[in-house]
Amino acid sequence: MPLPLWFTLFLSAASFAVMASDLVPDLPPSGLAYSGQERERTSFQTSKAWNPKFNLRSDVAIVYGIDTNLPGRIKTWQERGYRIHVMTGVAWGQYQDYLYGRFDGINHEDEAQTDGSGEKLSHGGDVYYMSPGTNYGRFLCVGIQRALDSGVSAIDLEEPEFWDRAGYSAGFKREWKDYYHEDWQPPDRSVDSRWRASKLKYFLYRRALEQVFFYIQDFNKQTGQQVGCYVATHSLLNYAQWGIVSPESSLAQLAGCGGYIAQVWTGTAREPNCYEGKVRSRTFETAFLEYGAMQNLVRSNHRSICFLTDPVEDSPDHSWTDYKENWESTMTAALLHPEVCKFEVAPWPERVFTGRYPSSSQLGKRELIPPSYATELQTVFNALKDMDQPKVTWEGSTTGIGVLVSDSLMFQRGDPAPSDARLGNVYGLAMPLLKRGLPVTPVQLENITQLHYLDGYRVLLLSYDGQKPLSPDVHSALADWVKRGGALIFCDADADPYLKVQEWWNSDGEHYATPREHLFEKIGIAPPVQLNQFKAVGNGGLIWLHERPERYSASAAGAAQVVAAAKQAAQKIGLEWRERNYLMLRRGPYVVAAGLEESIANRPFILTGRFINLFDAQLGLLKKVTLNPGSRHLLIDLDALRTGKAHLLASACSAQLTVNQDKQINFTVEGIDQTQAILLLEAPREPKAITLNGKAVTQFEYSVPEKLLWIHFDNKAFPRELAVTF
């Protein structure tokens, strides 16, 4: 996620409160050592050197930027036990050496992305978005070598982005000539030139990244090291809606790509969409679908995925209450994807823990993070390290439903015939089901040829309005899935102008008017096709809804049509249909739940038992949890963790167990300086004494009936010994 120029200026203003004294390391007086970390469960990214205010104690510190100061910044984090990744922007950065020819003697200013008016697209000043030429990947490798020489674990390549409104630079025109062997055409001249421009943009960043992947693989071969390489990218849904082309799913097919960091956060998820004719932000639902799209990039191809969330967002003008509510929504959405157990917990912790934002209670006042929010964040950050749970169960929902999406969703966003601005061809199909408590996810069309990729999916919805299949191979795989027992709902009126672009279905001897015709032929359905009815094929079947899918987002009646078709398809293949006004998932002892707004009219579900709310800085005990519309919950089910012995349940600091005996339990604790820590333990007996580095801790509470112990103290950014005796 980029640090915009306006935010850079914001940080340099008085509103960004980092005192000079904060830059002086706070050394541990106790003699305890910083512990190194071998696992990579949580991470954060920062452009700064270590600072006690940024001491999140995640497993990985992602150090941002490949400038000449990089080795020194890396060292400050290594000395405190962090594993190190280095992240650098792919599309933009401080790359003036390349721009002005100091790298290879060739001036590359004409590789700046340029719009139809001749304006270069800038991230601020001469930090341009690049249209990468053949040497651009080689240039990135020079800076990356600094990171490799510093002993990092991985390189994270951020945001390979080509704006849809770009494509007019001299550099892009040269690439067009080389790629298509013909003269450049303005992208807005016709749907065919728009489509071809988008395919070229997609190729150029794939090529640049492949150069870096190859370079790192070669380094590993030469040195015997195993430096990983990952791509930090927005979701396909967000890029399509924001008018950006990126190579997205194709990167996972390249040797050397270890996977993705899914850059989904409040800033992407609050983008408005249309449901039942109402356009508004739906942060939770949008984030759920964005995370689902990202997770489906790596299913079945053995790549890694890490989900990002952000406790604030790029805009500095929202209140702390707004940031907290939206972060809880995106965090809940992320955790409702049980296949993922790696998380980037904070891009730019410097702006979270030292930035000033509008007060939630005093108009016109900016203030530092509320202490309770700082504590809550650290509690959740530490809980995220425990999300790789062997037992996962959805509560009450019909699962196995997906909406097929293609990377070509990004190809039709510009003039002369842009597809629906609100992405109704996706949200119009997914939102009616999600709002009824069905955990529907976007399914990557390009990946369905992979072995077992569609295992677990029973009903799929698909439209070629706003996107097109990039290869005929996917139709054979989809037809086989239908015949084995899958139900396909095809939502399309054959009305998209881009059906006429020059592509595989109407070229090289093929004469299909639409790719749908090729798909239906592969499935074994001959015209005429009865509309809106289930047509059995093998053990499965197909329903054709003959409407442009964005119409399903335009009214309640449209949403009801989608639900009725999905319900009919499920019943025909024997899939039990269960609607709810909530989503709830158990991940081991953790309960992740969201009450849904704009949902069915049932009374809110009530969860009973003994729970700790991790979104509560006080870690209060709850015996009843109501899933009201709009509510978000991350709970510990105490009955799933009761052991009868002293053990840690939750903590707003890093708490490493060092002693665990019948009458004593000790932890090494460490956190963000000058924040409030809380530890919650199951404790079979009331403590006789609690000490922190040998000094008595007096702020604690013990519940005799619940056998729970809450301990409070101020965090410090160095290791200390917390001892509890019974």
Image (tube, rainbow, N blue to C red):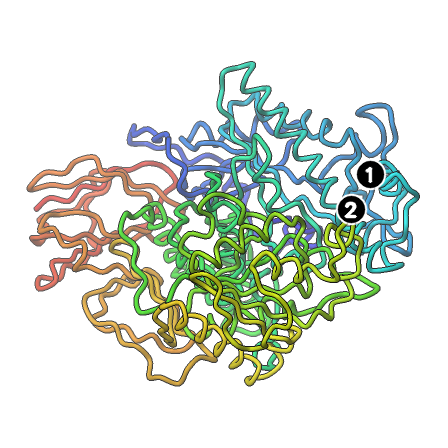
Residue 572 % position (x, y)? 41, 71
Vertical side of 372 occupied by 272: above or below: below
Residue projecting furthest to the top = 222
Nearer to us of marks 2 and 1 is: 2
- Element carrying mark 2: loop
Examine the image and state in which quarter residue 415 appears.
bottom right
Q: Amino acid at mark 1?
A: Tyr
Give, as a three-letter code, the residue at label 2.
Asp
Residue 508, numbered label: 2
In the rendered structure, the answer to whether residue 346 lies left or right of residue 128 reads left
Residue positioned 61% across, 38% down in the render: 157
Rendered image quadrant of residue 583: bottom left
Say whether residue 303 is left or right of residue 618.
right
Residue 157 as seen in the image, left or right of residue 172: left
Q: Relative to 252, does residue 586 appear above or below in the rendering?
A: below
Do residues under tags 2 and 1 come within 8 Å of each other at their CB atoms? Answer: no
Q: Secondary structure at mark 1?
A: helix
Q: Is residue 195 visible?
A: yes
Q: Nearer the viewer, residue 525 or 176?
A: 525
In this rendering, the answer to whether 582 lies above or below 202 is below
Residue 716 location, quadrant: top left
The earlier-in-sequence mark between 2 and 1 is: 1
The residue nearer to you, when weighing 617 against 460, is 460
Query: Looking at the picture, how far across and down is residue 192, in whole percent?
Result: 83, 56
Residue at the right extreme, as displayed? 183
Mark 2 Cα shell of 10 Å, populated few (<14), some (14-19), many (≥20): few
Residue named by callout 1: 179
Mark-to-mark CA distance, 2 and 1: 18 Å
